[in-house]
Image: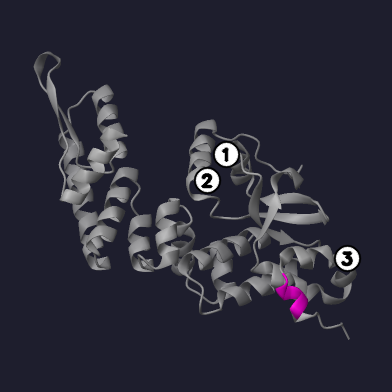
């Protein structure tokens, strides 16, 4: 019979657990895997080696710069996953883009989930158990689902079957991880609900999504009100797109202004001989003050 792991020792922290892992893993691997499955460790970037079998070699430099800037502002929200090779040596399993961006941001250590060798089946059971806990917020559920999907190479259908949820529920949660850090933070803190998040995740236009998010927080919009607002903006956008006769260069300027000020209703109106107008509407004093702050900056 396997020796029971000391719960006090587990409670001392992830580094204490890992420091003694060689003497414990053979007898207590199931308990250790369960503990590691929902514990995030901070590990040195210099101690992480890239998996030599990583199939992806090309990374968009501009996208990496954007992610690096986000990490500098909000930190790395979604931990990477590594396999422990020795006390100060880890091999990357997933998250190379996040690792590269963290290095660009100058981070010394980053959050990571740590796996052991040959722990696949136990990890799956531990992650399913995590998902079934009732106190997880929507982002924590999404992160756990993402880990389970990556670790076991599941499709969304297989993942839904494993955790006993509908496929649409799986998809909706995984889409949350594509939202920007400020929205994810609001979900974790309970400032907006899963219903709000689902509507925002369905908005592809960055400026529109940011505008709707700010309006939701500022005016405490209900999910139904947010849905109606999103639909009306999309309808307006499609009509304006059909009627738009701006040259491409002016369209690009208009889009940059919309992204800069976080509102999709900014318009560049072109007249004859190069004359025109830039129209910047606002819905409240708060939104106007936000725009003025951005101009001053």
- The secondary structure that dominates the magenta segment is helix
- Tell whether 251 sits left or right of 206: left
Circle 1 residue = 105
* N-terminal-most mark, 3 or 2: 3
Q: Residue at x 51, y 80 (%)?
A: 134
Question: In the image, which residues are magenta?
Answer: 8-12
- Tell whether 79 sits left or right of 290: right
Label 3: few (<14), some or many (≥20) within 10 Å?
few
Is 64 rendered above or below residue 150? above
Q: Dot 3: what SS?
A: helix
Label 2: few (<14), some or many (≥20) within 10 Å?
many
Picture quarter with the N terminus: bottom right
Contact between labelled residues 2 and 1, with CB atoms less than 8 Å apart: yes
Circle 2 residue = 71
Tell me where residue 74 appears, x and y as whole percent: 49, 50
- Report, in whole angstroms, how far the alpha carbon at label 1 lies from the one at label 2: 7 Å
Tell me where residue 175 appears, x and y as whole percent: 45, 57
- Tell whether 168 sits left or right of 56: left
Residue sitting farthest toward the bottom: 1
Label 1: few (<14), some or many (≥20) within 10 Å?
some
Is 10 rendered above or below residue 115? below
- Report, in whole angstroms, how far the alpha carbon at label 3 lies from the one at label 2: 34 Å
Q: Nearer the viewer, mark 1 or mark 3?
A: 1
Q: Residue 52 occupies which quadrant of the picture?
A: top right
Circle 3 residue = 22
Q: Residue 195 occupies which quadrant of the picture?
A: bottom left
């Amino acid at each position: 019979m396997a020796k029971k792991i000391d719960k006090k020792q587990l409670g001392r922290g992830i580094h204490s657990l890992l420091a003694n892992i060689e003497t414990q893993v053979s007898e207590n691997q199931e308990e250790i895997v369960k503990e590691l499955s929902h514990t995030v460790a901070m590990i040195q970037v210099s101690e992480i080696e890239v998996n030599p079998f990583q199939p992806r070699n090309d990374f968009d430099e501009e996208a990496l710069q954007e992610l690096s800037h986000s990490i500098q502002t909000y930190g790395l929200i979604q931990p990477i996953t590594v396999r422990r090779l020795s006390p100060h040596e880890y091999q990357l399993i997933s998250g190379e883009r996040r690792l590269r961006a963290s290095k660009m941001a100058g981070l010394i250590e980053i959050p990571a989930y740590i796996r052991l060798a040959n722990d696949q089946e136990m990890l799956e059971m531990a992650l399913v158990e995590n998902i079934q806990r009732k106190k997880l917020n929507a982002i924590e559920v999404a992160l756990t689902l993402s880990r389970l999907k990556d670790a076991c190479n599941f499709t969304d259908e297989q993942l839904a079957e494993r955790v006993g949820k509908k496929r649409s529920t799986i998809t909706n949660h995984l889409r949350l991880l594509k939202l920007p850090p400020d929205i994810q933070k609001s979900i974790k803190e309970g400032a907006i609900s899963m219903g709000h998040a689902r509507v925002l995740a369905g908005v592809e236009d960055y400026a529109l999504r940011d505008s709707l998010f700010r309006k939701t927080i500022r005016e405490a919009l209900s999910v139904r009100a947010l849905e109606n607002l999103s639909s009306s903006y999309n309808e307006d956008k499609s009509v304006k797109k059909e009627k738009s006769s701006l040259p491409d260069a002016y369209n690009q300027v208009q889009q940059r202004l919309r992204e800069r000020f976080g509102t999709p209703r900014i318009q560049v109106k072109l007249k004859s001989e190069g004359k025109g107008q830039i129209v910047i509407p606002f819905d409240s004093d708060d939104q106007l003050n936000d725009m003025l702050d951005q101009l001053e900056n």
